[in-house]
Image (cartoon, helix red, strand yellow):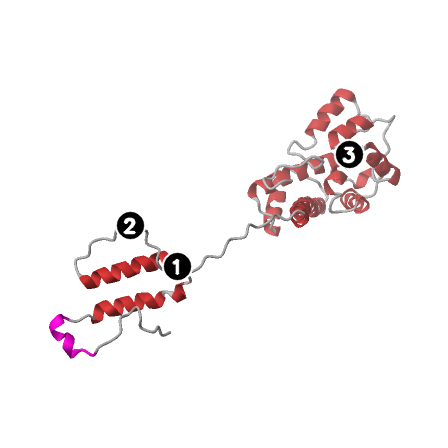
Amino acid sequence: MDSKGSIKQGSPDDKGFARVKMLLEATGGLSLSQVCAVTGLEGTTIQNWVKRGYVDNPIGKMYGEVQIARILIINSLKECIIPARIVLLMNYVNGKPGLSNQAIIKESVLYDYLCEALKLSGQSDDYSKSGVESIINNVIRDYSNPNPDARIKIRKALTLMIFACVCADVKRKVEAMMGQILNELENPQPVAATPAKLPKLELISQTEQAPEPQEEAEETVIEGRKKVSQALREWDISSVERIIIDHDEEARNKVPLDEEDKKPASKPWYVRKSTK
């Protein structure tokens, strides 16, 4: 299942077992090669499952509804649960093979429920316990069985199956991301070195004309700030912030000419020693 809720090849799709039923009705059974085409599995894998007793033996080399449904369920869960335990899960639902009176649901129907539940959970993107339980209750709403424990067993089994499919999808995403990281480690991209820039204060172009100020003090402040605004783009602000402060102080402290002799002489701002 991908991030949008669609099911990947080899996992239950949104059509469930319906497509397989159409083939079975037309053929009466599927050969090993046909089962491989439907499930995406290798023939040796299916034969190994039959040999180990996970799947019933085909009849006359033809696989019917019971075998194919079991194969589809195992294939859907095997990335997260080993096949031997998937069989135990099926035994929990329907009892041990051969005891048909203990079966509470066809595995083809259980597979349909799983497909529908995965489709709905993918649409809602809610994999919380309450969210999954709500989806399952909706999926099995038409299920009926005189056994009071039947619905409980199916609900538990479907909950486990849904989380197994989700975990398998997360695992695939993690492996894909890890592959990208490993590729970056093996093939690092060179980082272009940025040449260091020396601090510059005289950044006004010779062709650039300063605006005509109305007053001398205003001209000094504007010109100084223009230089500073340029310098800030290439110089550390801590190195020039004192210049701005000195500019502002010079403009504020400037006195009329008739009072100039009353004020003590002071050094111009541009030769005054900066203080932190």
Please tell me which residue is depicted at 83% across the width and 43% down the height of the picture: 96
Q: Upstream in the sequence, badge 1 or badge 3?
A: 3
Indicate the amino acid at tag 3.
Leu
Please tell me which residue is depicted at 81% across the width and 39% down the height of the picture: 101
Could you say where residue 178 lies in the image, as x and y percent from the top left? 67, 48
Could you say where residue 33 lies in the image, as x and y percent from the top left? 80, 27
Residues at marks 3 and 2, CA–CA distance in whole angstroms: 75 Å
Indicate the amino acid at tag 2.
Glu
Q: Which of 17 and 33 is in front in this view?
A: 33
Q: Which residue position holds label 3?
A: 41
User: Can you say whether 240 is above or below 74 in the image?
Assistant: below
Residue 51 occupies which quadrant of the picture?
A: top right
* Residue 200, numbered circle: 1
Give the dominant element type of the magenta stretch: helix, strand or loop.
helix
Residue 257 included in the magenta stretch of the image:
yes
Within 10 angstroms of label 1, few (less than 14), some, or many (20 or more) residues? few
Residue 176 visible in the shown view: yes
Q: Give the range drawn in magenta.
A: 256-264
Quadrant including the C terminus: bottom left
| Left or right: 195 in relation to 225 | right
Q: Upstream in the sequence, badge 3 or badge 2?
A: 3
Quadrant including the N terminus: top right
Q: Which residue position holds label 2?
A: 208
Q: Which of 29 and 97 is in front in this view?
A: 29
